[in-house]
Image: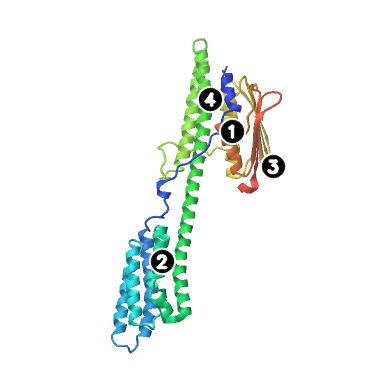
């Protein structure tokens, strides 16, 4: 079937043009300095743990220190119970709970001086840690300063040692909250980066499927229009090839989008899942390009069975994009050669066409969306790619994809 080729102006864009930047927006759910509301289950577990700690440590200290001391131990025990109950709201209103814990803690210490000030303010220190982890940093700094105000009382009761212990525990509580805060920020940053990388990967997949199929469809539509009157049977063959290419692209897009849908078990009625693109399907890929009138020669060395999935997919997509570039941008190209060599340590791919080199310079592997996508695919599996015009004419895409890192 005869096939037309794009103009020389289109060929210019293949080797030149600015390098597109892949960007990703920040999700609102991942933004902001404050990690956000603590999940109910986590808040409940935090309450049980902190309340149990206060009752076990401070409650025991009150019972031991208040033995035989009249009604004071009972009042102090009631205050300790009030501290444990107030911790129920430490994630919702940490400032109020911190103030209540500080007041009741100072009251416990005033009733039973044998209980250290550090132990009496245990609930307030726990709330300070929560506030430091979940609240604004400036607010937690003010809370730290407020918790340091009773330090003279600790010095009066316990001397330099009591002062040092009290200040150390308060600072450690605030520091533990800051450490947790930094850990959460790191997790959010990693999640955001993973989202951006996943968006870029999906964009490359969609580009590979759509760009290749549409290029074939455009060329075949042009060929059908060219021979519609004189050779209607040949025009019908081109239209059938367009239909087949469109169905194939829709199947691959459904497969791609289904992988990111929550309802993974949902299947189209009467439509089986298509196989994942791989080097084993190179003949199908070559046939779609041959249907445009271009000669495609395939050379394989080694077996493609058992390849790491990432390397297999990357190699297939590089060949697909290279042939798509030939169809779209190679001026006068009517032949392409694809060589895939599978060795023990790596897979090498080489695609060469016989198109005319455009005037005005040459490009690199980073020029244009397609070449950038091929370069990214090779890089993500630890490989390398070079692309550029050949001295005697034509364009070469060569990639080396190691299997050790992908495995």
- Spatial CA span between label 2 and label 3: 65 Å
Name the side, left or right, on which 245 lies relative to 11: left
Tell me if residue 66 comes above or below residue 339 in the rendering. Answer: below
For the point 44% across and 36% down, which residue is it? 271
The residue indicated by pointer 2 is 145
- Spatial CA span between label 2 and label 1: 57 Å
Of pointers 2 and 1, the one earlier in the residue sequence: 2
Of pointers 2 and 3, the one earlier in the residue sequence: 2
Along the viewing direction, whichever of 37 and 403 lies nearer the viewer: 37
**Secondary structure of the residue carrying numbered label 3:** loop
- Spatial CA span between label 1 and label 3: 24 Å
The residue indicated by pointer 4 is 216
Of pointers 2 and 4, the one earlier in the residue sequence: 2
Is there CB contact under 8 Å for labels 2 and 3? no
The residue indicated by pointer 3 is 343
Tell me if residue 291 comes above or below residue 29 in the rendering. Answer: above
- Spatial CA span between label 4 and label 1: 18 Å
């Amino acid at each position: 079937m005869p096939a037309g080729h794009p103009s020389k102006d289109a060929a210019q864009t293949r080797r030149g043009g600015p390098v597109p930047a892949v960007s990703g927006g920040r999700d609102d759910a991942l933004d902001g300095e404050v990690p956000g509301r603590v999940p109910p289950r986590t808040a409940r577990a935090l309450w049980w743990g902190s309340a149990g700690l206060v009752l076990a440590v401070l409650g025991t200290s009150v019972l031991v220190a208040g033995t035989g001391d009249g009604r004071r131990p009972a009042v102090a025990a009631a205050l300790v119970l009030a501290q444990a109950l107030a911790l129920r709201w430490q994630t919702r209103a940490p400032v109020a709970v911190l103030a209540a814990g500080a007041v009741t803690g100072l009251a416990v210490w005033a009733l039973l001086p044998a209980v250290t000030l550090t132990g009496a303010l245990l609930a307030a220190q726990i709330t300070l840690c929560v506030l430091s982890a979940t609240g604004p940093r400036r607010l937690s700094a003010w809370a730290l300063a407020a918790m340091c105000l009773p330090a003279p009382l600790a010095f009066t009761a316990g001397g330099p040692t009591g002062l040092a212990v009290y200040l150390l525990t308060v600072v450690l509580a605030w520091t533990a909250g800051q450490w947790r805060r930094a850990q959460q920020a790191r997790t959010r940053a990693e999640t955001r980066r993973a989202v951006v990388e996943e968006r870029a990967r999906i964009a490359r997949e969609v580009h590979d499927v759509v760009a290749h199929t549409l290029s074939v469809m455009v060329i075949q539509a042009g060929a059908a229009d060219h021979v519609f009157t004189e050779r209607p049977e040949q025009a019908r063959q081109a239209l059938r090839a367009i239909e087949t290419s469109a169905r194939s692209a829709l199947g691959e897009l459904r497969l791609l989008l289904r992988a990111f849908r929550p309802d993974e078990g949902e299947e189209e009625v009467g439509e089986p899942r298509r196989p994942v693109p791989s080097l084993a399907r190179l003949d199908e890929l070559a046939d779609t390009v041959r249907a445009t009138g271009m000669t495609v020669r395939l050379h394989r060395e080694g077996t493609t069975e058992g390849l790491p999935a990432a390397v297999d997919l990357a190699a297939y997509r590089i060949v697909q994009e290279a042939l798509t570039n030939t169809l779209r941008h190679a001026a006068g190209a009517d032949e392409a050669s694809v060589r895939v060599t599978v060795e023990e340590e790596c897979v090498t791919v080489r695609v060469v066409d016989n198109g005319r080199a455009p005037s005005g310079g040459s490009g690199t592997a980073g020029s244009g969306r397609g070449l950038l996508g091929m370069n990214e695919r090779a890089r993500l599996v630890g490989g390398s790619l070079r692309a550029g015009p050949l001295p005697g004419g034509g364009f070469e895409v060569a990639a080396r994809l190691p299997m050790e890192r992908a495995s």
